[in-house]
Image (cartoon, rainbow, N blue to C red):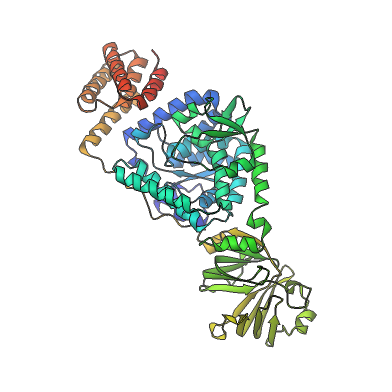
């Protein structure tokens, strides 16, 4: 068992999602990282205990999260396992459909990076503060986690488009560049322009994109309860010091939740939200996502759904009315004069399944080059081929070792020697032909020299959804992890010196040595901070907090307060952060 697997021994991660899971590597977090976590958590706990959903405060405890330090994923899993959930660490943004898929399995994907000290109030990049402190606590509420699971099951089957995936890559790149302290202004602007171009290239809003909007306005930025006095439950708000406070002010519009309004309202991850939706309760959200599911390709099927899937260069599954499920990248469709799809074709590894279970002998190895088959009734025959009796099969010459000619109502013609007839659950799902040729309007769709032709049977396509029917057997997910990754930080000697100062402060707080030792160490840290790090407000807050609580060094307390006052006057953006920190310390 490797280390990543041991980190998640309490979590059963499906095979097709394992490629997104990364090791947390807990030792890489610096003392500054822990101080950033602690500042945000103390602020949020103080403010959100009055304004967040009732499950939040108790949920922090039951999800294995401490205010004092960045959570260890192993400890979180020990706590989450008690409510049937788990968590894994991932590398930043992952495709929405993959994120939803994790939640469908009761797994919370947590970005393991943490925001920079300079971005302590808000970061556009997913980080462990957002994922762990934002998402995990509300899972304590049974209805809420039911919503997450329901959303995950539906969202993991949503069809996206090529433009969606390119937009995701642009968003991921921008979030990485903005959070990277070594990024230049030119690199940031180039990433912003890339995102603008990819956003403009999106011509139609896919069902995956619509669900991503619904997720944003509920799970990420949702309010609940009374429109005039709502509570916060969205993770984006619960994890943002600034926005959790500003979102309840009158200048942020509060709109009664509606499914239609949410899926029609786009969002910008780099800016505070100008409006928020207030749901009545979590039951309203469950009803909404179930209602949306009725409009999705997985529910309606047909030509329109096949066309949507053909625009998605990832694995999708087309379900015939016989129950046969064809999983692969849908590459080509043939249409009749009415514009109805009469033949589908996949490219690359394809698998066939029934009821979500891969058929033996019809996995990706067998259909490594793709799969193609007609859709529809036989010409002049009202009975669907999948419902044929043995007698009806014999009328059409569909008997083992006999050559048959099948002409479909669409004009697709299949000529070959019948090799086998396969029934599942009382319906014919496949007919195999040797020495077979398939043609349509003068176009050859299958040649005899290509081997056995496995023909899917079905009058129509009743469902189309993202991903494979048997995801475990197929082993790969709808999307692949991005090749764009954040650079691991390389710390300068000066930064390492600052880390050591933060660690000394942390040791004093955690070990609580005698007053004489605490005073000596903290006085040394203050002198070194004044000498080398005059603009660091957070370490001064950390020292002042300890001195104030233990009634030590009143002269140093006064000195620190003066330094903090000077810093708040110097930089308006950090003034509120300093004020909030002083408020928790007290006068």
Which residue is found at the position 21% from the left and 25% from the top? 528
Is 375 rendered above or below residue 22?
A: below
Left/right of residue 584 with respect to residue 80 in the rendered view: left
The image shows residue 347 at horizontal and vertical percentages of 52, 70
> Is residue 87 or residue 1 the one in the foreground?
87
Q: How many marks?
A: 0
Q: Quadrant of residue 384?
A: bottom right
> Is residue 207 or residue 225 the one in the foreground?
207
The image shows residue 90 at horizontal and vertical percentages of 44, 48
The image shows residue 403 at horizontal and vertical percentages of 68, 88
Q: Quadrant of the C terminus?
A: top left
The image shows residue 271 at horizontal and vertical percentages of 45, 37
The answer to whether one can see residue 361 in this image is: no
Which residue is found at the position 65% from the left and 42% from the top? 286
Q: Quadrant of the N terminus?
A: bottom left
Is 473 rendered above or below residue 395?
A: above
> Is residue 310 or residue 355 the one in the foreground?
310
The answer to whether one can see residue 442 in this image is: yes
Q: Quadrant of residue 509?
A: top left
Query: From this viewpoint, which residue is outermost toward the bottom?
Result: 402
Is 548 rendered above or below residue 203?
A: above
């Amino acid at each position: 068992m490797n280390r990543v697997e041991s980190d998640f021994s309490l979590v059963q991660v499906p095979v097709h999602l394992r490629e997104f899971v990364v090791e947390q590597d807990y030792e890489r977090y610096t003392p500054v990282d822990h101080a950033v976590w602690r500042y945000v958590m103390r602020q949020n706990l103080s403010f959100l205990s009055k304004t967040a959903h009732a499950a939040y405060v108790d949920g922090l405890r039951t999800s294995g999260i401490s205010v004092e330090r960045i959570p260890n994923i192993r400890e979180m899993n020990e706590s989450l396992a008690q409510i049937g959930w788990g968590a894994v660490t991932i590398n930043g943004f992952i495709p929405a459909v993959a994120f939803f898929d994790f939640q469908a399995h009761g797994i919370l994907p947590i970005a393991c990076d943490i925001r920079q000290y300079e971005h302590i109030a808000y970061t556009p990049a997913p980080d462990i503060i957002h994922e762990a402190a934002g998402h995990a606590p509300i899972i304590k509420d049974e209805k809420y986690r039911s919503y997450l699971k329901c959303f995950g099951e539906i969202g993991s089957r949503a069809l996206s488009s090529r433009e969606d995936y390119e937009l995701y890559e642009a968003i991921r790149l921008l979030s990485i560049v903005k959070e990277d302290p070594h990024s230049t202004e030119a690199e940031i602007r180039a990433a912003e322009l890339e995102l603008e171009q990819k956003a403009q290239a999106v011509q139609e809003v896919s069902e995956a994109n619509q669900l991503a909007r619904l997720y944003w306005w509920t799970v990420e930025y949702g309010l609940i309860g009374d429109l005039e006095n709502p509570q916060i439950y969205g993770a984006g708000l619960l994890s943002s010091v600034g926005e959790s406070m500003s979102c309840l002010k009158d200048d942020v519009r509060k709109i009664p939740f509606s499914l239609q309004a949410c899926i029609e309202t786009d969002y910008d991850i780099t800016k505070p939200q100008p409006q928020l939706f207030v749901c009545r309760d979590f039951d309203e959200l469950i009803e909404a996502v179930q209602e949306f599911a009725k409009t999705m390709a997985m529910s309606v099927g047909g030509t329109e759904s096949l066309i949507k899937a053909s625009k998605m260069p990832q694995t999708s599954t087309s379900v015939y009315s016989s129950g046969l499920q064809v999983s692969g990248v849908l590459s080509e469709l043939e249409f009749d004069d009415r514009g109805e799809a009469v033949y589908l074709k996949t490219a690359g590894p394809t698998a066939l399944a029934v009821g979500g279970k891969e058929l033996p002998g019809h996995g990706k190895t067998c259909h490594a080059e793709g799969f193609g088959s007609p859709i529809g009734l036989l010409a002049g025959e009202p009975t669907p081929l999948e419902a044929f009796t043995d007698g009806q099969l014999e009328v059409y010459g569909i008997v083992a070792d006999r050559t048959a000619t099948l002409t479909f109502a669409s004009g697709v013609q299949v000529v070959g020697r019948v090799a086998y007839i396969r029934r599942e659950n009382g319906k014919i799902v496949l007919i195999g032909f040797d020495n077979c040729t398939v043609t349509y309007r003068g176009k050859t769709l299958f040649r005899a020299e290509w081997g056995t032709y496995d023909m899917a049977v079905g009058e129509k396509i009743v469902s189309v959804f993202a991903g494979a029917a048997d995801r475990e057997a197929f082993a790969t997910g709808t999307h692949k992890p991005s090749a764009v990754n954040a650079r691991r930080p390389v710390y300068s000697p000066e930064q390492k010196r600052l880390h050591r100062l933060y660690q000394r402060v942390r040791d004093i707080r955690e070990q609580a040595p005698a007053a004489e030792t605490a005073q000596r160490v903290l006085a040394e840290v203050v002198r070194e901070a004044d000498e080398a790090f005059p603009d660091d407000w957070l370490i001064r807050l950390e020292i002042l907090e300890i001195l104030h609580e233990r009634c030590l060094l009143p002269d140093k307390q006064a000195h620190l307060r003066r330094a903090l006052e000077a810093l708040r006057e110097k930089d308006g953006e950090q003034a509120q952060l300093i004020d909030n920190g002083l408020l928790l310390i007290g006068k």
